[in-house]
Image: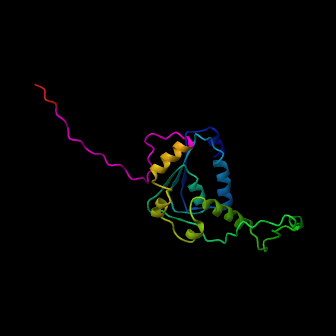
Amino acid sequence: MEKALAKRPRQFQIDLVGNGEIPADWALLIRSILIQRAPQTQLITNARSSLQGGSVLVWLLGDRRIIRDDAGMFFRRMEMPGAEEADKEETWKANEPKYADSFSETDPEDADYLKVLRLINEFLPVKELAGQIINLPVLRQFGLVENEKLDRFLATALGKPREPNGNSINEPKQKRVRADAKVSKSE
């Protein structure tokens, strides 16, 4: 992925297919690669399957997001502790590592999953939606698919050139209006 993005393509598409789960650590790695791409590279994320966990984050990173009409997404509920600030005078006392062995209470995988949930929370309200299947109508409500008007606004505001005929698969197709044929009178 890094090599492909280093070539600065106009578009880069990620198809998400399969059981829908990308481990949290991998999702964070993919995110770190994608946010370093060239500004002119449009990222298209295409969910061909239902998504869960870290794959939700990867899909949300797309400039253009596509999801199969009957697919959904899910992220499990997890306690998200508040951003408690440590006492600056007491931080030097924390010389014992928090993760001592596999039986300790802190799990590195859970810590990564919390980071993923915090990043997902920038797009979707995690506390309200965790533990539920999120389907296409909910994604529409949050403007994550089929939002051509918002896409145009963001493209203008962020200075990204808009693709001609860059319609999303999920956006409604505009109907053509047939005009009556005009017949010229030639004699």
> Can residue 7 be spotted in the picture?
yes
Q: Where 110 falls versus 175 (above or below)? A: below
Identify the residue shown where x is 53% and y is 57%: 17
- Residue 128 rendering spot, x and y as whole percentages: 56, 70
Q: Where 29 falls versus 42 (above or below)? A: below
- Residue 155 rendering spot, x and y as whole percentages: 52, 44
Q: Residue furthest top?
A: 187
Q: Quadrant of residue 9?
A: top right
Magenta stretch: residue 173 in it? Answer: yes
Q: Residue furthest left?
A: 187
Give the quadrant of the C terminus. top left
Q: Quadrant of residue 183?
A: top left
Q: Where 54 falls versus 100 (above or below)? A: above
Magenta span covers which residues?
A: 158-183
Residue 124 as seen in the image, left or right of residue 187: right
Identify the residue shown where x is 56% and y is 56%: 60
Q: Quadrant of residue 124?
A: bottom right
- Residue 132 rendering spot, x and y as whole percentages: 53, 71
Magenta stretch: residue 25 in it? Answer: no
Overall secondary structure of the magenta stretch?
loop
Identify the residue shown where x is 54% and y is 41%: 160
Comparing 163 with 3, the one in front is 163
Comparing 80 with 112, the one in front is 80
Comparing 82 with 111, the one in front is 82
- Residue 15 rendering spot, x and y as whole percentages: 54, 52
